[in-house]
């Protein structure tokens, strides 16, 4: 079966005009001619660097926005406490002002009482002065009283004289006590009024000072809250800008990834009439002899986006410039930039089997060109969405990605390329001989 397939492609290549002499397309070199460096396309490495930078900026801005919002919450809580404290201080100030007014009223009342006491003291002092004057005018002793008793014509008159003398003495004592009481009351009232006013003024002043301090603190806290609000708004705007850039890059990456669907459609259309592949229909060998698949086919984390998705092929790590060989005979369908694949070659091998080679540093074939197993088709690179030099190798059946290790014989030595071509040519010659003999 392999000989027949090789024979068919050899006959096709003999019958087809030699296209290798034509000028190669941009990024494509004809066999036997120096290969041009292909357009990297896709910008995978730079796109990954940009995406990584954006992710870093986003993480930093998210942290800064969270910190700004936490600071907003803290400052607003403190501002609420200061607002409540200011309300309390203002209420205390109103109460202190009321106390001062009551103290003023008390002081006024005490002042009035002092004035009354002063008037009483003046009256008592005047009465006492008159009493002293009267006593002095009468000789300053009790002669008049004794004489009045001796001259009394009756017991009643003698009793009146004695009572009068006692009244005068008692009145004098009362006047002295009244004067002392008035002076004491005046001093008490004056001291009480002064102390009450002083206490009320001091309390009112203390509360007013505390209220002013809390008001100033509230105003400063308001300014801090406003400053943090502006900062949080700026950080949020910066975050939205970075997230917008991130969305654009993710859109570009998603667009590149959709290229895979385009390859599938192209292969499916070209292979619509081909028979289904069965093991052994096509012998496919290692496209980079000496290297094996490291990152295998299957679900894995995307190297840039970090999301889990199907890795549609196998990655073969090799130095940039390592030659890539066609693993089997076939026709080149695609040779050029293919989105996230970068520089890409797609080959149709018949039997519904197609192969894809991504991230090449250069392309050595062009669309429509027939290649034999072992022919160089390009070189390993890191174009497109790639994080380093490697070959992204896919095998597809009617366009659907399939595990390359289930189709390709990676252990087959590359020295069989020329030998199998020789055997195919011999088989073709034998077939022609039998046809002639039978004819």
Image (spheres, rainbow, N blue to C red):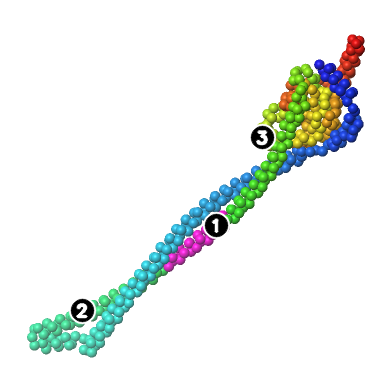
Q: Nearer the viewer, mark 2 or mark 3?
A: 3
Q: Is 240 located above or below residue 351 in the figure?
A: below
In the figure, is residue 311 to the left or right of 321?
left
Q: Tell me, yes or no, if residue 52 can be seen here.
A: no
Residue under circle 1? 222
Res 40 quadrant in image:
top right
Of labels 2 and 1, earlier in sequence is 2
Res 352 quadrant in image:
top right
Check residue 40 for magenta coloring. Answer: no
Which residues fall within the magenta stretch? Answer: 200-225
Q: Tell me, yes or no, if residue 237 can be seen here.
A: yes
Between residue 329 and residue 130, name the one nearer to us: 329
Residue under circle 2? 170
Of labels 2 and 3, earlier in sequence is 2
Residue 7 drawn at (x, y percent)? 86, 19
Residue 317 drawn at (x, y percent)? 78, 30
Q: Quadrant of the C terminus?
A: top right
């Amino acid at each position: 079966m392999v000989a027949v397939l090789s024979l068919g492609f050899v006959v096709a290549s003999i019958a087809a005009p030699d296209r290798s002499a034509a000028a190669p397309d941009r990024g494509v070199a004809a066999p036997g001619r120096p290969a041009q460096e292909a357009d990297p396309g896709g910008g995978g490495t730079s796109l990954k660097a940009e995406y990584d930078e954006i992710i870093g900026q986003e993480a930093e801005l998210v942290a800064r926005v969270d910190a700004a919002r936490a600071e907003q919450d803290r400052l607003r809580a403190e501002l609420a406490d200061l607002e409540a404290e200011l309300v309390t201080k203002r209420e205390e100030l109103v109460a202190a002002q009321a106390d001062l007014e009551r103290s003023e009223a008390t002081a006024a009342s005490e002042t009035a009482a002092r004035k009354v006491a002063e008037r009483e003291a003046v009256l008592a002092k005047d009465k006492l002065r008159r009493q002293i004057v009267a006593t002095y005018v009468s000789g300053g002793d009790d002669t008049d009283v004794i004489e009045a008793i001796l001259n009394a014509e009756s017991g009643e008159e003698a009793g009146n004289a004695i009572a009068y003398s006692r009244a005068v003495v008692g009145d004098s004592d009362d006047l002295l006590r009244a004067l002392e009481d008035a002076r004491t009351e005046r001093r008490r009232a004056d001291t009480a009024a002064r102390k009450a006013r002083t206490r009320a003024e001091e309390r009112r002043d203390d509360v007013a000072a505390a209220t002013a301090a809390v008001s100033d603190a509230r105003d400063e806290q308001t300014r801090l809250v406003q400053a943090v609000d502006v900062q949080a708004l700026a950080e949020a705007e910066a975050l939205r800008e970075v997230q917008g850039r991130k969305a654009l890059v993710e859109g570009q990456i998603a667009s590149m990834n959709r290229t895979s669907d385009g390859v599938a459609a192209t292969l499916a259309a070209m292979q619509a009439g081909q028979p289904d592949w069965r093991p052994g229909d096509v012998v496919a060998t290692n496209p980079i002899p000496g290297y094996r698949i490291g990152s295998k086919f299957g679900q894995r984390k995307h190297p840039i986006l970090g999301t889990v998705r199907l890795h549609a092929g196998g990655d073969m790590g090799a130095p940039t410039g390592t030659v890539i060989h066609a693993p089997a005979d076939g026709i080149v369908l695609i040779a050029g930039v293919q989105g996230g694949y970068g520089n890409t070659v797609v080959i149709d091998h018949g039997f519904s089997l197609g192969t894809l080679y991504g991230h090449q540093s250069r392309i050595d074939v062009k669309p429509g060109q027939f290649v034999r197993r072992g022919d160089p088709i390009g070189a390993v690179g890191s174009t497109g969405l790639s994080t380093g030099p490697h070959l992204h190798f896919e095998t597809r059946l009617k366009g659907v990605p399939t595990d390359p290790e289930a189709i390709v014989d990676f252990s087959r030595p590359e020295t069989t390329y020329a030998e199998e071509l020789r055997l195919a040519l011999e088989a073709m010659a034998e077939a022609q001989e039998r046809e002639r003999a039978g004819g």
